[in-house]
Amino acid sequence: MSVSYAGRLGRPRRWLSRLGVVAVVVLVAACGSSNATGTPVASSGASSGASTAASASAASGKAWMDATKSVDDRVAALLSQMTLAEKIGQMTQIQNKIDPSIVTQFALGSILSGGGGAPAAGNTLQAWYDMVNGYQQAALGTRLGIPMLYGIDAVHGNNNVFGATIFPHNVGMGATHDPALVTKECAAVAQEMNAVGIRWTFGPVIAVPQDIRWGRTYEGYSENTDLVSQLGTACVQGFQGSSLSAADTAAATLKHFIGDGGTAYGSSHTSNYILDQGVDPMDEATLLKLFLPPYQAAVKAGARIVMTSYSSTTAGKVHGDKHLITDILKTQLAFTGFVVSDWGGVDQVVPGDYAKSVAQSINAGIDMVMVPDDYMKFITTMTSLVQGGTIPQSRIDDAVSRILRVKFEMGLFENPMPAAGKLDEVGSAANRALASQAVSESAVLLKTSANVLPIASTGQKVLLSGQGADDIGVASGGWTISWQGAPGPIESGTTLKGALASKLGDNLIYAPSGAFADGTKADVGVVVVSEQPYAEGVGDSSTLQLPANDLALIAKMRPLVTKLVVVVISGRPMLLDDFSSADAVVAAWLPGTEAEGLADVLLGAKPFVGTTPYTWPKTVTDAPRVGKTACDGAVYPVGYGLDATGKLLGPAAC
């Protein structure tokens, strides 16, 4: 999921002032005309429990509750009973800033947490489960008892939840080149989602970034289409398991269809963004060659939900492109799941004309709209467009059928909520160990000299500096607890400083700013230089420069130590102009909460096996890669890396 503006988390709860009893009555009456009965949306009360609601509905003779029937038969049976209001409700997704009663009144199909969308009761595990369950019980209390689907950006862990295991961002997982590890990661994330009641993730990102100046580069596995196809499919298999209805599985979302990472520098018209939400200038043949294969592979592997991109092609906004959404995705790829918009993405299709934007997007093939706030405006607009014939009833029925099909496949009608009492699975020792393994496998040794690594765990004094060495927020990057992420102890976990201290004891001396006592000398110095957290277009960069105060630590440390190791924490390759004095350079990407894995490779407990998932450019103008050979304007090509002895793990440096 994405956001097109800053400050999304501070939006006021306007629904109390907007929504009055008269508005509700008028809207339900207006939406009640349909081929099916015009019974009002809400029933007299919500179910007292998920399984109770399901069994009671089956006993009442509702044909769609008969699990012995095929999914298609159940969808048809339910659709035939739905009013227009109920159908539009299923197509509506609102963020978790509304009272659950709104879900019941409008039969809403989905609720989501945006970045930082924690429960009003607080960011605790129990509060998460209780919040989701409250919305679900409200959905079960509607006339037809259709369960809602709760979605969240669980993109490197269940990363909105305090206490969750935070894995390396996809750029790091791409550096592992290990599909089996990615499958295990995504399965672990699904487990931690289920523990707090959530069964839909807005991931994986299967973008193929072609310009690392893009602020979402770290969300992509690689610039290499084949690698993205392999790892994206592996993640889908991890989230969804052998069956979407099985315990501890989650519906994956392929995003963002299509052209993510291919926009031209300077083409964005959103806020102060440079590339994000910009225009893909390439012809369709090039667009599909670069960006379609990961979708083709993941759809074949069972992906059931696709999110559209904020990007535009030369034909206009993808959110309104029927050729791409319906002709390519739904028809050519035979995709039978549903398509969800991005956050407010529909609004951008025809600037200044909301009704035309909605009409074009729905007719293009979007099935569910991430509104995400003004549900009244969306529902009334949709109702008017359908009743006026601008959006055909057949398009509504197709969209709702797709949404219901996925809900039936997920087993939501039988088990609307995951089992309670599994909160201890969040941040479990097993999941943290897996994340630590991913950190070790993702670290890429870019440069080394004889006898520099590994660092001896005894008999040597080690100096450590840099904010990122002891900052969970910096190590985790954006999309951690909040949309943009933030420095500081925003999550629980282990920093590099903590991991090294546990192994080196008093032999480790840490000074974040490099202000060591006069006369300090050591065998080894480790300097951590870091990008500060960011997300989306806020992270678009015109320089690819690391912070000057961090870079200054390299020169400050050099005369104090015999051997100097520089560790780079970043969401993409950064310029290395100031690194010539380092004896070894390690790209750690955005490792998350389990930096013990980074300490393991530095100290030799585990080998360096990671290789670069992106080309490392010589200059910032070398960042765009479309049409270039592997070493054109590059320091290191895709697949480059060294082991601790300096042996190549892939192609040579350029």
Image (spheres, rainbow, N blue to C red):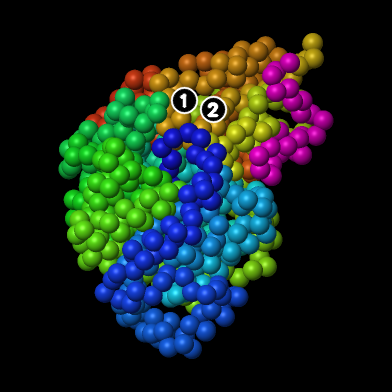
Spot the residue most to the right. 506
Residue 615 appears in view? no
x 52%, y 48%: residue: 17
Spot the residue most to the front. 22
Contact check, label 1 and label 2, Cβ < 8 Å: yes
- Which residue has dot 2 on it? 531
- The amino acid beneath tag 1 is Met
Label 1 to label 2: alpha-carbon separation: 9 Å
The one of 409 and 626 positioned closer to us in this rendering: 409
Quadrant for residue 331, please give it: bottom left
Q: Secondary structure at mark 2?
A: loop
In the rendered image of this protein, does residue 446 appear above or below residue 341? above
The one of 653 and 467 positioned closer to us in this rendering: 467
* Label 1 or label 2, whichever comes before in sequence order: 2
Residue 337 rendering spot, x and y as whole percentages: 33, 63
x 41%, y 37%: residue: 4
Q: Which segment did they paint magenta?
A: 489-515
Residue 371 rendering spot, x and y as whole percentages: 40, 50
The one of 545 and 362 positioned closer to us in this rendering: 362
x 38%, y 85%: residue: 63
The one of 291 and 491 positioned closer to us in this rendering: 491
Quadrant for residue 541, please give it: top left
Task: Say which quadrant the C terminus sits in.
Answer: top left
Residue 595 rendering spot, x and y as whole percentages: 64, 40
Discs 1/2, front? 2
In the rendered image of this protein, does residue 296 appear above or below residue 563? below
Q: Which mark is residue 574?
A: 1
